[in-house]
Image (cartoon, rainbow, N blue to C red):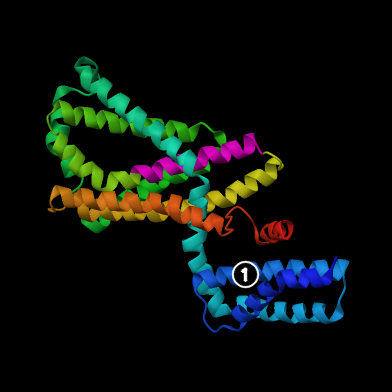
C-alpha cells in the first residue's frame, strides 16, 4: 500500500474528525458525522498497522481516535445525541425499511374494507341477516356517535391508545407465523366496511366520515404498518438471503422493535386526536384537517426522513459491531 497516496486520500477526513472532536457543541448531523468518521478512521488505523506500519502516523491516528472516542462517550452529550439520533434517524430509517410492505398492507386493508362496504350496502338482506334493522338504526343514530363522548377525553384517549397498541403489538409479535397479521388486517377492514355500510344505509354518511377520518387515517396507517412489519419478519425467516435464518431474524427483529416504538408514538397521537378532537364541537373540516395533517406527517417521516436517514448510513437492524464491519467493508 502506498502510504503517501493513502494519506493524501484521507487527510481531509482526519482533519474533520479532529475538528469535530474539539468542537464544544455538536448538532445532530455533526454528531452522526463524528461517529461515522471515528469508525472510518479506526478502519484506516487498522489498515496502516497491518499493511504499512508507519510509527509516526499510527501514533497520530491513535491519539486522534482516543480524543474522538472521549468526545463520543461524553455522558451528557452521548445521552442527548443518542436520543436525538434515535428519533431523527433510527425511527425514520426503520419505517423506511418497511415502506413498500406498508403500502401493500394498506392497499390490501383498504381494498377489503371497500369491497365489504359496497357488498353489504348493496345487499340489504345480507346486511339485515348480519345486523338486525333495529340494531342498525340504534347503531347509526346513537351508539356510533356516543362512543366518542361517553368517557372523559383523557380517559378515552388512554383507552383507545391501549387497545390499538395491543392490536399492533399482536400483529408484530405473531408476525413470524405469517398468518395472524393478515387475519387481523382482514377482520379490521371487514369491520370498517360493515360500519360504513350500516351508516350509509341509515343515511348517516356524514356522521360516519366526520367521526372516523380525524383519528382513523393515522390509526389505520399504524395498524397497516404493524401488519406489514409482522409479515416482513416472517419473510426474513422464510427468505434470509445471504444471511443465516438466525442472523436474518435478529437483524429484522431489531428493526421491528424500532417500528414498535414508532407505532406506539403514532397511536398515542391518534388516541389524543380521538379523545380530544373527534368528539369535540369543532367544525367537521377542522376535525378532518387534524387527521390529514397527522397522517401526512407519518408518511413523510417514513418516506422522506427515512430515505435521508438511510442515505446517511443509518441501519436500525445492525448492532454497533455490525455497523463497524459495514464501514470497514465499505472503506
Q: Quadrant of the C terminus?
A: bottom right
Q: Is residue 257 above or below residue 106?
A: below
Q: Is residue 62 visible?
A: yes
**Residue at 35% across / 34% down in the picture?**
188
User: Horizontal and vertical percent for residue 182?
Assistant: 46, 32
Binning the other alpha carbons within 10 Å of mark 1 as few (below 14), some (14 to 19) or many (20 upward) gives: some
The residue drawn where x is 57% and y is 83% is 23
Residue 156 is at least partly visible in this image: no
Residue 101 horizontal/vertical position (percent):
49, 39
Name the residue that disc number 1 marks: 35
> What residue range appears in magenta?
220-240
Q: Is residue 171 above or below residue 271?
A: above
Q: Quadrant of the N terminus?
A: bottom right
Q: Give the secondary structure at mark 1.
A: helix
Q: Is residue 306 above or below residue 210?
A: below
- Determine the main secondary structure of the stretch shown in magenta: helix
Q: Position of residue 4 (x, y in %)?
A: 81, 72
Residue 218 appears at what percent x and percent y? Answer: 33, 47
Magenta span has 304?
no
Residue 230 magenta-drawn? yes
Q: Is residue 259 left or right of residue 284?
A: right
In front of the other: 324 or 18: 18
Give the quadrant of residue 197.
Answer: top left
Task: Name above or below for residue 67 compared with residue 48.
Answer: below
Q: Residue at 66% of width from left, 59% of height from top?
A: 323
Residue at position x 20%, y 28% in the image? 198
Amino acid at each position: 500500500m502506498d502510504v503517501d497516496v493513502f494519506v493524501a486520500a484521507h487527510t481531509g477526513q482526519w482533519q474533520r474528525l479532529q475538528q469535530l472532536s474539539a468542537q464544544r457543541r455538536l448538532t445532530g448531523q455533526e454528531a452522526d458525522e463524528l461517529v461515522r468518521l471515528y469508525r472510518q478512521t479506526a478502519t484506516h488505523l487498522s489498515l496502516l498497522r497491518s499493511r504499512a506500519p508507519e510509527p509516526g502516523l499510527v501514533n497520530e491516528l491513535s491519539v486522534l481516535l482516543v480524543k474522538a472516542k472521549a468526545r463520543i462517550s461524553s455522558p451528557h452529550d452521548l445521552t442527548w445525541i443518542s436520543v436525538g439520533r434515535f428519533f431523527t434517524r433510527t425511527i425514520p430509517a426503520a419505517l423506511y425499511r418497511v415502506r413498500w410492505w406498508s403500502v401493500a398492507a394498506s392497499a390490501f386493508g383498504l381494498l377489503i374494507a371497500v369491497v365489504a362496504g359496497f357488498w353489504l350496502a348493496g345487499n340489504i338482506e345480507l346486511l339485515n341477516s348480519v345486523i338486525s334493522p333495529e340494531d342498525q338504526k340504534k347503531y347509526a343514530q346513537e351508539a356510533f356517535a356516543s362512543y366518542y363522548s361517553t368517557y372523559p377525553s383523557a380517559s378515552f384517549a388512554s383507552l383507545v391508545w391501549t387497545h390499538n397498541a395491543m392490536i399492533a403489538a399482536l400483529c408484530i409479535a405473531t408476525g413470524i407465523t405469517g398468518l395472524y397479521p393478515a387475519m387481523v388486517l382482514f377482520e379490521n377492514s371487514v369491520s370498517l366496511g360493515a360500519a360504513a355500510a350500516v351508516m350509509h344505509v341509515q343515511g348517516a354518511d356524514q356522521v360516519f366520515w366526520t367521526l372516523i377520518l380525524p383519528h382513523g387515517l393515522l390509526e389505520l396507517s399504524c395498524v397497516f404498518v404493524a401488519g406489514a412489519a409482522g409479515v416482513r419478519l416472517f419473510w426474513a425467516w422464510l427468505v434470509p438471503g445471504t444471511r443465516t435464518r438466525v442472523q436474518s431474524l435478529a437483524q429484522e427483529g431489531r428493526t421491528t422493535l424500532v417500528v414498535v416504538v414508532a407505532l406506539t408514538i403514532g397511536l398515542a397521537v391518534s388516541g389524543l386526536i380521538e379523545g380530544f378532537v373527534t368528539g369535540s364541537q369543532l367544525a367537521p373540516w377542522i376535525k378532518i384537517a387534524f387527521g390529514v395533517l397527522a397522517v401526512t406527517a407519518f408518511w413523510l417521516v417514513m418516506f422522506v426522513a427515512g430515505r435521508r436517514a438511510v442515505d446517511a448510513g443509518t441501519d436500525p437492524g445492525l448492532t454497533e459491531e455490525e455497523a463497524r464491519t459495514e464501514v470497514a467493508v465499505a472503506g
